[in-house]
Amino acid sequence: MASSYAAVLSLLQLLHDIQRPSGRWNNCLDDLQIQLLRDRLSYFMAFLEDFHGKSEAADALATQIMDASRAAEDIIKYFVSVQVLRPYINLGELHLPSYARDIQAIIRKTDVLLERALEVRDEIVAVDHKSINPPIVAAAHSRQAAPTAKNPMVGLDDALVQIRDKLTGRGSKLETIPIVGMGGIGKTTLALNVYNNDWVVEHFDIRIWITISQTYILREILLALSSAIDKRDMKEKSDEDIKQFIYQSLFGRRYLIVLDDVWDIEVWNVLRRFLPDNGNGSRVLLTTRLVDVAADFGSDIPYAMKLLEEDKSWDILHDMVFSEEVCPIELEEIGKKIATSCGGLPLAIAVIAGVLRRTEKTLESWEQVAENLNAIVTWENEEHCFKILLMSYSCLPLHLKPCFLYMSRFREDESIKVSKLIKFWAAEGFIKPINGKILEDVAREYLDQLIDRNLILVRKRGVSGKAKNCGVHDLVRDLSLKEACKENFILVEKLSSNSAVFVWGLRSEDGRLLLKLLSSQASYVLNNNLVESIVHLVQFRYLSIANYTGRLMEKKLIMLPFLWNLQTISIHDFDTTFTVPSMFWTMTQLTHINISRNIVLPEPPPKFQSCCTLENLQTLSSVREFRCSEEIYKRIPNVKKLKIVYFSQDVEEGPYYSLTNLVHLCRLESLVLHGMVSIKDISFPHSLRKLRLEYTNIWWSEMVAIGSLPNLEILVIGDDGVQGLEWNVTEGEFVRLKRLHVIFVGLKYWRVDEGSFPGLEELFLHGIKLEELPDPFDFAEIPKLRLIKLNGCGELSKSWAKQIKEECEELGNQSIQLELIS
């Protein structure tokens, strides 16, 4: 039913969007018809939520609801698109279907479906509830984060020591060490823990982690290797040049390379040719599911991972479900039974733990889990794990299922940027609106719930502790792909024509057509055979394109506002400045504008003309010559991320740009200032959490204005971001700062009073030749300091950082890490 639910929710969002005042389609649609549809759809949503999976009749009806919803959405989108485009583009002899007739037919169909829904509801209610298995997972009123205090290495401690000793042993020749085992048994977990082991980190000069996966492109592996060694751009180099660079860069250094999830020995046969044997104990560690690959790969006997013993399985399950709490005595026996039924597979244990955390801590509820689990367990290779995962999917609340099935569109082992994923979910219409909450905040809650159930994995966390990058295990991705196919989900393997998301490269023909439209003049006459495609293309809610071959060079994109349904636009490698058309101020659904170079905002039209407040707009980047006048800031009241670019000739008269009005953007959290702005012309809002300065006219002596910001957590001072030689930080400044990056500035003398930066966690200095540094003991006393990274900062700074580490260790902080790069 996930596809049915997604179709209903997407149509509801569309109807909500087109009823907003915009001045572009207000007279296109019949309000009574729209309201009738919304009423019926609201009931269908409630029906699907309450009765999904309760009977065959309910499932059959869900399919009919899905078909009717998709048909209605196609008709409405098509009609609105034509009405928006027709006054400005010659659509030729386009034959418009009778919108009124077709939509009326849809309404009649929904009337029939509504009657049937009432009948099915009564049938289900009439059934004796004792004959229906109660849901395994109890309804949760609050979300409890998955325990993260302990690394799930139970049962692998001995393995870690064995692999670590092999990596750091006395053998001087280059050795290859394979780890082999079935999918989900913990190969990557073991390898990652070895990779990050303090002993291993200290032993090797350089460590590189590469994930191979079942399908790979050799050039991408070469680029990943070269990037891990040196951040320089090698994309224009030939494969042979990259191989030579890797060989020369690794020559003479003791290195560790991890090749994770290898399916084919051929990739190693290629890589081994340009990995030097330096005679200093370099190592290559590999993980694979295939015994023959491990046997062909290793210069050592493969380490074969075994399924966990019953007591170890219970230890893991107990820790994941209860964390620091004690398991009730009455649940121990059934808990051990459940752990045993997981077959010793760590992934299966983790997924079942996600189910149990959401289940009432009662004997009856846990017996229900055990009975269902035992019914689906088989011992036929990985089908065992798949069926356990299937139970975890079946137990998901209906509103989470479309978001989970959407994960099938990503590649194996892909690290997915969370901010992009939740934009995708919102654009596809998978998120149910909640009064008083931004749609993407609700999407973030959905993500957290899927993480809690161990169906989505956190790859990287940000300063706030929230997931920054995520992904899914291969077996979980297989599950989402199979279920997406079975349920006729709209997104399988690649984006379909029904998708509201357009990412350049997925549909090259559509891409050329879309760029042709966006860069055209209003009088442009399209060929009749392209009209149907153009009408479809302007319906996207998410648009991401890249200017790889200059397609957008010197184009003005004057047709951009005709993407009437647009929420997010992202244009990369855009190397020219253009002024957004004045109709920009009517794009009330816009949420994110992320254009890598410079756009110039048009002046808002007079109040008597059609113009709306862009209340949904959260991201605005990058804006050249931004004037924060009252007319502007009142129209973008909810902006959270803003990047502003000025050049010296632009800011000769600072007050003209009214940056003192930034203080009125009371939801602004992230700000990038690029250009010769002065501190006297700026008033920062107290909501600011992240600030980046580049090429400004701000002086170190003026930094107290920034240091006093009460919520600032991240400060990045980029190239010439602040002027002068001397920075004195007084007590009480930067009270909540967690991350400080200072890059390529002329700073020579840095003094810090005791008690400054009390919450600092990460310090990154790059390309700075300091002659005077703060007292290392003052930094060692910062309780949460965990990382100091210096790059090209000279010997004095290196010695200072080492002193801090020594002082920290004497104070009991053993977790601080140093990364010192010459």
Image (tube, grey):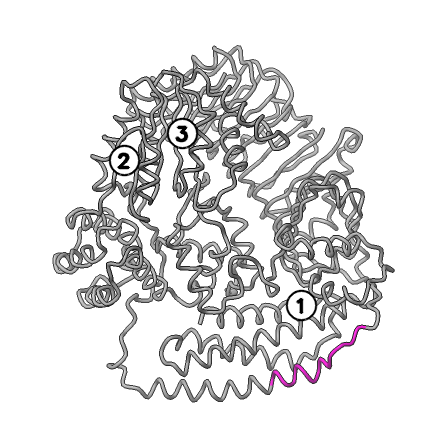
Q: Which element is circle 1 on?
A: loop
Say above or below: 566 vs 594.
below
Would residue 490 be found to the left or right of residue 176 on screen? right
- Please say if the residues under marks 1 and 2 sit with CB atoms less than 8 Å apart: no
Q: CA distance from mark 2 to mark 3?
A: 16 Å
Q: Which element is circle 3 on?
A: strand
Q: CA distance from mark 3 to mark 1?
A: 55 Å
Residue 363 on the magenta segment: no
Question: Which residue: 46% across, 30% down?
Answer: 271
Image quadrant assignment for residue 177: top left
Please tell me the numbered disc located at residue 20: 1
- The one nearer the camera, 340 or 653, is 340
Task: Identify residue type, mark 2.
Answer: Pro
Would residue 16 be found to the left or right of residue 612 on screen? left
Earlier-in-chain disc, 2 versus 3: 3
Disc 3 crowd rating (10 Å Cα; few below 14, some 14-19, many 20+) is some
Residue 445, percent from left and from top: 44, 56
Name the quadrant of the N terminus: bottom left
Disc 2 crowd rating (10 Å Cα; few below 14, some 14-19, many 20+) is many
Residue 104 on the magenta segment: yes
Residue range in magenta is 94-107
Task: Identify residue type, mark 3.
Answer: Ile
Please tell me the numbered disc located at residue 257: 3
Q: Which element is circle 2 on?
A: loop
